[in-house]
Every structure is written in structure tokens, then in C-alpha cells.
Amino acid sequence: MQRRNLVRKLGMKVPLRSVNSLTVALLSSILIFLARPAQAGMTVYELTDVARLRLEDISFFAFVLLVATLGIRFLWNFLAKDFAHLPRLSFLKALSLTGLLSLLMLLILVMISGARELLTPGAWYRQGSHYRPNDVGNREIRRQSMESLRAVLMQYANAHAGRFPPHDYVSEVPTKLWEAPDSSGTRYVYVGGLTLSQSNALLVCEPQNFGEERLTLSTDGTIQTAKPDEIHRLMGAQDQR
């Protein structure tokens, strides 16, 4: 009331809205000037490589299941137009039918795999997620690959005072020799830092996707087969030295 009387006496007209806006702007400027620096950003969670690959696989199969469900539903309902006795399928029923068909196909594939093992015992061996023929030719290829690597490693040791390569990325050994003869080209398991004086020490062995009978190479040049338990025992004994 007093402000209005003062304004009238001075003959000035100051809008009340302008005064309020000026006050708000002044207070905002003060708060901004006095504010402390804030840490911007938010927490980011990342998946491990294994979890990411599994999530990708699950997403892919979920997408395939969805597409198959929609396809079966479309075909069924399309045929139901010509056959009055066929009921129409909802999405939930089509999803259930697709799941049952998938389980039936999986059962048939397992039966075929089992019959193959019964009809040809010992003719196949498991390598990773699939099976490979366990024939003589395949064994010869594995042994020839190990012998080629042995020749180069022995040549390296003779040229370096009996010491083998410290790791499996030295330039003197071609990269191709470190790759095992399988479809994925996995590398041999190599124990670096050994010498020729350490006789019977495990130097190289095939990776775990070669099954229960894996070829090994010792520092004395011996190539033989060993089971995973024996390989782990040898590696553990060498680590304790």
C-alpha cells in the first residue's frame, strides 16, 4: 500500500510484474554465482565379454522364435480360411506350438547323434561344440602340425643357448605354426621361459577343444597324448618350481 502511494506521489508507473521478474533474475544470478561446481554424469554398468555374448545369443534365438511364431500363425490362419474345422490361432497358441515343434526337432537331432555313436563307436570325438571324425588321417594332421612346431622351437633353442621363446609371439616362429589344425584356428597352449636342460617339462599342448586325448610336446622333443587332468598336473608342478 505504501509503495503504491509512493508511486502515485512520484507520478511513476512501475508494473508489479516487472519488479517480480527483476527480483527473480537477481536472486538467480546470486545463486548461480555462489553455486559450487557439480560432478555431472551417471553410473555406467558394463557386461563382461561372456555375459555380452550370451545376451546376444539369447536375443538372436528370441528374435528367431518370434519370427517363427508369427510365420506359423499366419500360415495356420491362412489355411483355416479354406478348412472350416481348423480353429484360428492366437499369438499365445502359436508360440506354444512353435515351442513344442522346436523341442521335437531337438529330440530328433539328439536321437540321430546317439544313433551315429552307436553305429560307429569311436569314429567321432568331441571338439568344442561339434564332433569331428576320429580317423587316422586327422590324427596324422595333428601330429604333423605338432612336429612342424617342434622343429622350429628346437631350432630357436639351439640358437639361443638352449632357451625356448619367452612367449608365443616371437618373430622367429611363424604365426601359422602356433595355430592348431582345427576349423576355428585356435592357438596351441605354450609354456614360455623353459630351457633344454629342463627335461620332460611340458612345453606345448593342444587346446581344450581337442577332447580328452590331446597331443603334448615336451622340452626333450617328445610328442605324446595326455588327458586334461595329466596336463593340469604337469603345469601345476612346473609353476611350483
Image (cartoon, rainbow, N blue to C red):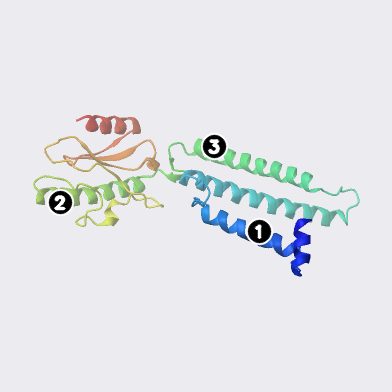
Residue 184 in the image, given as x and y percentages of width and height: 41, 52
Q: Mark 2–mark 3 contact, CB under 8 Å?
A: no
Which numbered disc flags the more N-terminal residue, 1 or 2?
A: 1
Closest to the camera, between mark 1 and mark 3, is 1
Residue 67 in the image, given as x and y percentages of width and height: 69, 54
* Crowding near the residue tagged with mark 3, few <14, some 14–19, many ≥20 C-alpha atoms within 10 Å: few
Amino acid tagged 2: Tyr
| SS of the residue under disc 2 | helix
Per the model, the C-alpha gap separating discs 1 and 2 is 84 Å
| SS of the residue under disc 3 | helix
Q: Is residue 22 left or right of residue 206?
A: right
Is the N terminus in the top left, top right, bottom left or bottom right quadrant?
bottom right
Per the model, the C-alpha gap separating discs 1 and 3 is 85 Å
Residue drawn at point x = 78 percent, y = 65 percent: 8
Given the current orientation, which residue lies at the most extreme right position?
Answer: 84
Amino acid tagged 3: Gly
Q: Is residue 185 left or right of residue 7?
A: left
Residue 107 in the image, given as x and y percentages of width and height: 62, 39
Q: Mark 1–mark 2 contact, CB under 8 Å?
A: no
In the rendered view, tell whether residue 106 sits above or below residue 35.
Answer: above
> Disc number at residue 114?
3
Q: Nearer the viewer, residue 166 or 206?
A: 166
Residue at numbered disc 2: 156
Name which quarter of the figure residue 95 lies in: top right
Is the C terminus in the top left, top right, bottom left or bottom right quadrant?
top left
* Crowding near the residue tagged with mark 2, few <14, some 14–19, many ≥20 C-alpha atoms within 10 Å: some
Residue at numbered disc 1: 23
In the rendered view, tell whether residue 164 sits above or below residue 237.
Answer: below
